[in-house]
Image: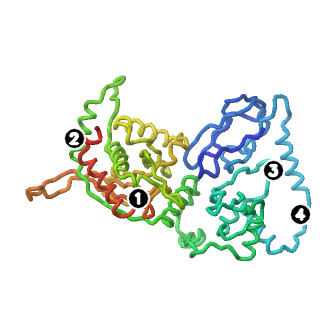
């Protein structure tokens, strides 16, 4: 039985083996942990699903494998280790066999060689049974189906699948159709090419002779770079900003923490300003339901409950665990859940269901003394709230005098495809009213 690299989330394309709990030749039974993997977002143990002998380990500690790759092989009890032997024999034959003479390639063949070049040689003992990346839906809006390989080739070469007529069964678009479109130059996606910036060689040339250290990108940094570049290039951002008074909230927070019940000598909760921010945004999304939505390509999805993501800083990156149904939870429940999610996020122990989804998110840099900033929307979210530090600021009192109050600046980034200017202002105004009158979050 082949043990495959699992897919931990829709956007996860590969995993890194960080630890083996078993060695080749060990007997395993269902439920035994075989190895530990680390993706760009989380770490988890992969258990065995059948009994037998671990006859082959194809991916060593520290190596990265695509989703669906054969990481190991479990043979029935008492069987030999055919996979590893066959793998060695296959490689030996490949090394001994003379290289075939190159032949003149037709344009279509040349394109096919170029398309497959990045994938490397096919290894039957290291196969990829699922797409390594997400290159779009298998069914186009017109109803035409597209094979996984055709989607990958089209994505790599910038081909618009809606312009291709399929030659497969029932009009299905297959790889040969995409290759023909590449060879003929037809089917190119419309629009200007996206700027990619200077190449690595060009950047390095600028610092030739300057002492520096090269830091290879890990999976998390690659994902952050790809997703946020996509967000800025494809999401029409606009921003609304408000200053919000915090005196009433800070007083209520102090009283609530002072009255927290003790459990084993420790308070049952310790509310932070961020806990109030989460609750207030969740309730504001309920008051402005049109903003509790995401962009879904050819439609908008609106949600009944408020699932709010909260950015958590990690070593070398960040992740956004989601508080589900936040509008229904008490402040103490939100506080305790957020602390537990943040701890597991920093340990890379979150499950995909705990950081995927949501309609909006919060990024709070107030603890660093940042006055205000604008956050980048995390697709497919329609909004993200950037929260600055609480500061004592002078304001005009109703009688015209000057008084000092505690204020923070909140900036709401909006996707104009989903949220128009007035709707974004309405959402931020609802959030402000809840923060300035926090007792309304308790009833």
Way the structure is coloured? rainbow
* Among numbered discs 1 and 2, the one appearing first in the sequence: 2
In what quadrant of the picture does the C terminus appear?
top left
Q: Which of 153 and 17 is in front in this view?
A: 153
Residue 31 in the image, given as x and y percentages of width and height: 67, 30
Q: Distance between the residues labelled 2 and 3?
A: 65 Å
* Among numbered discs 2 and 3, the one appearing first in the sequence: 3
Residue 91 in the image, given as x and y percentages of width and height: 85, 51
Q: Distance between the residues labelled 2 and 4?
A: 78 Å
Q: Which residue is drawn at 65% across and 69% down?
A: 160
Q: Which residue is drawn at 53% across and 63% down?
A: 230
Q: In this view, does 17 lie to the left or right of 172?
A: left
Give residue 146's quadrant in the image. bottom right
Residue 375 — which label?
A: 1
Q: Which residue is drawn at 56% across and 56% down?
A: 223
Whether the residues at callouts 3 and 1 have beta carbons within 8 Å, the answer is no
Residue 124 — which label?
A: 3
């Amino acid at each position: 039985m082949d043990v495959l690299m699992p897919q931990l989330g829709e956007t996860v394309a590969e995993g890194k083996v960080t630890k083996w709990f078993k060695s080749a030749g060990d007997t395993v039974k269902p439920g035994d942990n075989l190895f530990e993997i680390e993706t760009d977002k989380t770490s988890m143990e992969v258990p065995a699903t059948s009994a037998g002998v671990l006859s082959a380990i194809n991916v060593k500690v520290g190596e990265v494998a695509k989703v669906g790759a054969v990481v190991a092989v479990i043979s029935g009890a008492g069987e030999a280790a055919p996979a590893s032997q066959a793998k060695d024999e296959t490689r030996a034959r490949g090394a001994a066999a003379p290289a075939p003479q190159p032949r003149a390639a037709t344009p279509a063949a040349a394109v096919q060689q170029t398309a497959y070049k990045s994938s490397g040689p096919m290894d039957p003992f290291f196969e990829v049974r699922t797409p390594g990346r997400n290159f779009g839906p298998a069914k186009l809006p017109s109803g035409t189906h597209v094979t996984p390989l055709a989607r990958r080739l089209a994505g790599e070469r910038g081909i618009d699948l809606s312009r291709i007529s399929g030659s497969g069964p029932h009009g299905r678009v297959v790889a040969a159709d995409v290759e023909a479109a590449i060879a003929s130059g037809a089917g190119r996606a419309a629009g200007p090419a996206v700027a990619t910036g200077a190449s690595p060689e060009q950047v390095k040339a600028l610092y030739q002779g300057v002492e520096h250290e090269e830091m290879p990108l890990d999976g998390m940094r690659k994902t952050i770079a790809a997703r946020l570049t996509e967000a800025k290039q494809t999401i029409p951002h606009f921003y609304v900003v408000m200053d919000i008074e915090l005196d009433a909230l800070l007083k209520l927070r102090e009283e609530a923490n002072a009255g927290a019940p003790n459990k084993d000598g420790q308070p049952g909760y310790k509310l932070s300003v961020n806990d109030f921010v989460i609750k207030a945004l969740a309730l504001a999304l309920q008051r402005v339901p049109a903003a509790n939505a995401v962009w879904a390509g050819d439609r908008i999805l609106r949600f009944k409950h408020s699932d709010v993501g909260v950015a958590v800083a990690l070593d070398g990156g960040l992740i956004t665990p989601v508080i589900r149904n936040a509008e229904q939870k008490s402040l103490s429940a939100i506080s305790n859940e957020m602390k537990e999610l943040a701890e597991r996020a920093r340990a890379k122990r979150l499950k995909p269901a705990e950081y995927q989804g949501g309609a909006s998110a919060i990024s709070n840099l107030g603890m660093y003394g940042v006055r205000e900033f604008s956050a980048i929307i995390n697709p497919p979210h329609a909004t993200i709230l950037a929260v600055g530090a609480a500061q004592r600021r002078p304001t005009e009192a109703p009688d015209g005098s000057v008084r000092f109050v505690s204020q923070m600046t909140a900036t709401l980034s909006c996707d104009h495809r989903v949220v128009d200017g007035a709707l974004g202002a309405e959402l931020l105004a609802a959030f402000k009213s809840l923060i300035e009158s926090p007792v309304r979050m308790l009833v």
